[in-house]
Image: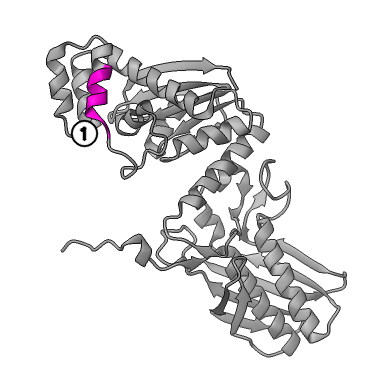
Amino acid sequence: MKKETKDPKDMRHGYTTGSNATAATKAALLSLVRQEPVETVTIRLPIGDFVTFHMESVIITDDSVEVAIIKDAGDDPDATHKARIVSTVRWSDQDGILLDGGIGVGRVTKPGLPVKVGEAAINPIPRKMIRETVREVLEEAGSQRGISIVISVPDGEEIAKKTLNARLGIIGGISILGTRGTVVPFSTAAFRASIAQAISVAVNGGCEHLICSTGGRSEKYAMELFPDLPEEAFIEMGDFVGFTLKQCKGRKVKHVTLVGMMGKFSKVAQGVMNVHSKSAPVSFEFLAEVAKQSGVPEEFHQEIINANTASQVGTMMYEHGYTSFFEQLCLRASEEGLKEIKGGMSIETILMSMKNELLGREAVTWEKQ
């Protein structure tokens, strides 16, 4: 039986680790103030919505309260979906609000992230959410006592293995994230944000040459081609070629290498900078024109036009030894990338086959700003 695929507009939104940590902290502080379990709280999200959360457990001791909540990411395939997020709150002898990360929350070890090196990977907006919520509770309770808060994720270190945290220099667990408070299924905004963050970390780490791949397979291949580059120099850009190049230029990166396969890079060579399968079809007439300019015999031109996939065209050219076709395609992709950002860097395009064979490699430099 074929599994039904939901329409994106019908998908259920979830809530970020930041929202869950805030809700758990509010429940813990209220339980500490009242000395009785508070299992349901309502918080205000950054987008202005009020949302009610239910706690999984509330444990009260003499001087602290530990509250656990299970993150619901909705229909998004998030690595932290169903993660257990814990907030431990206690009174403190120090004034103000002390916020830190515990087990399973990563520590920042590299510059370029929105959190300082050495601090827990709790991003600025979740920090603000937690602090504002705590202030409101204390004000309502008429208390001016200091508060210590520790956010933990018991399985965070294991969950982090499914993320790019280690490459970004976040060690020991996941990050507490969220700008809206909600998780939008298959959010392109979230993917773009991760690209921008990865580029920032790479540049702050001194990387002058970034390798941008369309997926995990092409990234693995790229790492074999450039074994001397540090891990943070490799950026997984997915379908967002244009966005990635603009981010690189904005960070004054001088040399970018794009690595991918026929399907996506055939589109880049046409000037299409978002290479998702739904963004624009591959033009086989365009590929036939590239073949013509590359000196491929005319007998192949109609066969290219009638092909089903760009990969099929690539296999045809490879089997007949027309390497000039791939060189021309790479040259066009590099040139179109430079047009997109109006120059200012060197762009190299590397085309690989499904069998991890090097098909073509061409670089273009355009210093015009």
Residue at image point 41% right, 40% down: 239
Dividing the picture into quadrants, the one containing residue 94 is: bottom right
Residue 232 in view here: no
Residue 340: % across, % down? 48, 29
Q: Residue at x 60, y 27 (%)?
A: 253
Q: Is residue 287 magenta?
A: yes
345 left or right, relative to 288:
right
Q: Secondary structure at mark 1?
A: loop
Nearer to the camera, 315 or 276: 276
Classify the position of the C terminus by image quarter.
top right
Boundaries of the magenta span? 282-290
Please give the name of the residue rendered at 63% of the width and 61% of the height, measured from the top-left corner. Answer: 103
* Left or right: residue 80 compared with residue 46: left
Q: Which residue is mark 1?
A: 309
Image quarter (top left, top right, bottom left or bottom right) of the N terminus: bottom left
The residue that appears at 28% across and 31% down in the rendered structure is 354
Q: Position of residue 75 (x, y in %)?
A: 40, 64
- Residue 144 screen position, x and y as percent: 86, 78
Q: Is residue 365 above or below residue 105?
A: above
- The amino acid type, in three-letter code, at marker 1 is Thr
Q: Position of residue 65 (x, y in %)?
A: 69, 79
Q: Nearer the viewer, residue 157 or 256?
A: 256
Using the rendered view, name the quadrant where residue 219 is placed: top left
As drawn, is 252 to the left or to the right of 266? right
